[in-house]
């Protein structure tokens, strides 16, 4: 297995980062396109309330599945460092424990979601006319969430063992399945929100089953082996300490979504929630290459930190920040030039088209600076420093965005919500850069 992963410690940083980041970016792109197309289909074929319903429900599904994502990212960080230190047995043990944790926890939370669906939907902002389509969608996709959690757990592990192209496929295959099934179930069979939910559920299953196939096949040196399923307390603590960063972050995002939906409903009604649904999809899609650079950065930094190659870790940070900042600046220019055209992709509703472009421009004002914040928080997660990783990860959503969403609308109405995004980006980036520089200077002395 080390033969596969060894290039993480020897190949040229820029080439290696591209090799890791491009498949990750493509995977995120296709997954984002999947969610965008989903939103376009329900918006064009069902209506404005359908966009609002998807905006309410998907954060619930991702909150549950983020358990798998957290376990995957936390465990993959340990695996990368174990491979760098030539501890193959530990890598197998960590992976087995990841599987047990993901299956047990995701199934438990799905059962809770089924029994308490109505109050959960209300908590996340399914108010007024949004409740009916949201419930139709929620009670279908909830059954696919364990598959999604397993896929999210397996994806970073696949990258950690040096197979980024297969990690990319875990997002591409379900995206194509969802798009095709959306057309069949919504357009031709006229199944409405139930059809949209059914297409999403099947796509989650495709992703989870692909990850299962990969780790059972000859393509992976890291195998699913039942003897490693038994939980080992020391491994469990290490996975939770690092994976908890992702889980807490997603939990914070879910709290943010609750506050956003209630604030938007209070100041602008259901239409404002639909506006946020469009902005959120554009954010997911447009930032895919920046997120891909961040994902590609993680295994390289983790492996070289495990191998005690501090200078190579430092060069990886510099290269990743440079690549991501250039890309983010290009994205920023595109959003500033074509906000109306972007909004028109999602809806023909005149009221929505009148509001969305200005909101889109405001929300994206700080896009050029975001890479440093993403890489800074990812660095501490990659090297196994759970507490700074957690604090830096929570800076934007937890420490700045949530308070700003409470405060600014009191003075600026709905516009205050959109203003909160760039202000939070600038503040969180500034603090992350200062902390990262101090830490790197200390480590290099």
Image (spheres, rainbow, N blue to C red):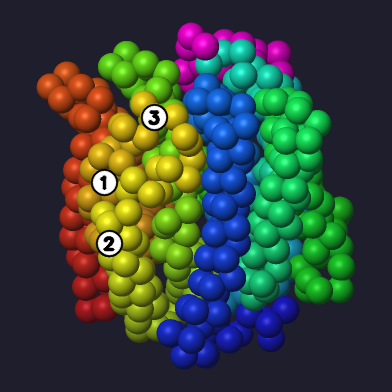
Question: What residue is pinned by disc 1?
Answer: 361
Q: Quadrant of the C terminus?
A: bottom left
Residue under the image location 54 percent in, 73 percent down: 22
- Determine crowd level at label 1: few under 14, some 14-19, many 20+ residues with C-alpha closer than 10 A: many
**Which is closer to the viewer, label 3 or label 2?**
3
Which label's residue is closer to the chain start, 2 or 1?
2
Residue bearing mark 2? 333
> Which residue is at a point 56% across and 26% down the rendered structure image?
47
Residue 179 in the figure: left or right of residue 319: right
Quadrant in which the N terminus appears: bottom right
Q: In x, y percent, where is residue 293?
A: 45, 68
Q: Is residue 421 left or right of residue 46?
A: left
Q: Are marks 1 and 3 in contact (CB under 8 Å)?
A: no
Most common secondary structure along the magenta stretch: helix
Mark with earlier residue (1, 3): 3
- Density class for disc 2 (Cα within 10 Å; few <14, some 14-19, many ≥20) is some
Name the quadrant containing residue 111: top right
Residue 201 location (% of width, % of height)? 74, 37
**Which residue is at the front of the view, 330 or 185?**
185
The image's mark for residue 350 is 3
Q: What element does badge 1 sit on?
A: helix
| Mark 3 nearby-residue class (10 Å; few <14, some 14–19, many ≥20) | few
Figure quadrant of residue 294: bottom left
Where does the image place residue 269, in percent across and percent down from the top left?
37, 16
CA gap, disc 2 and disc 1: 10 Å
Asked whether residue 307 is in view, the answer is no
Per the rendered image, the range of residues in magenta is 114-129
């Amino acid at each position: 297995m080390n033969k596969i992963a060894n290039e993480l410690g020897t190949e040229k940083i820029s080439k290696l980062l591209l090799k890791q980041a491009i498949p990750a970016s493509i995977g995120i792109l296709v997954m984002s396109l999947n969610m965008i197309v989903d939103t376009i289909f329900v918006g064009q074929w069902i209506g404005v309330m359908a966009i609002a319903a998807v905006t309410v429900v998907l954060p619930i599904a991702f909150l549950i599945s983020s358990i798998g994502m957290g376990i995957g990212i936390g465990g993959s960080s340990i695996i990368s460092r174990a491979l760098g230190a030539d501890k193959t047995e530990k890598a197998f043990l960590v992976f087995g424990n990841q599987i047990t944790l993901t299956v047990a926890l995701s199934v438990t939370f799905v059962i809770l979601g089924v029994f308490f669906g109505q109050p959960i939907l209300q908590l996340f902002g399914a108010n007024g006319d949004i409740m009916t389509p949201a419930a139709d969608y929620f009670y279908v996709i909830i059954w696919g969430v364990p598959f999604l959690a397993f896929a999210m757990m397996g994806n970073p592990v696949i990258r950690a063992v040096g197979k980024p192209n297969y990690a990319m496929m875990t997002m591409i295959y379900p995206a194509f399945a969802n798009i095709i099934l959306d057309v069949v179930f919504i357009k031709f069979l006229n199944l409405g929100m139930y059809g949209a939910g059914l297409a999403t559920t099947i796509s989650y299953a495709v992703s989870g089953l692909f990850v299962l196939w990969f780790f059972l096949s000859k393509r992976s040196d890291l195998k699913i082996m039942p003897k490693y399923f038994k939980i080992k307390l020391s491994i469990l603590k290490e996975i939770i300490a690092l994976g908890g960063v992702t889980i807490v972050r997603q939990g914070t995002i879910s709290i943010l979504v609750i506050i956003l939906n209630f604030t938007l409903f209070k100041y602008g009604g259901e239409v404002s929630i639909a506006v946020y649904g469009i902005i959120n999809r554009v954010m997911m899609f447009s930032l895919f290459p920046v997120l891909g650079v961040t994902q590609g950065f993680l295994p390289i930094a983790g492996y070289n930190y495990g191998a005690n190659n501090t200078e190579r870790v430092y060069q990886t940070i510099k290269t990743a920040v440079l690549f991501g900042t250039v890309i983010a600046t290009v994205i920023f220019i595109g959003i500033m030039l074509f906000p109306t055209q972007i909004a028109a992709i999602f809806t023909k509703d005149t009221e929505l088209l009148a509001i969305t472009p200005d909101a889109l421009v405001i929300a994206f004002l700080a896009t050029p600076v975001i890479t440093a914040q993403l890489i800074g928080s990812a660095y501490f997660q990659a090297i196994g420093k759970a507490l700074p990783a957690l604090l830096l990860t929570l800076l934007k959503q937890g420490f700045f965005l949530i308070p700003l969403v409470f405060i600014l609308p009191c003075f600026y109405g709905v516009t205050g919500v959109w203003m909160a995004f760039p202000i939070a980006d600038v503040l969180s980036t500034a603090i992350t850069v200062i902390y990262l520089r101090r830490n790197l200077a200390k480590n290099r002395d």
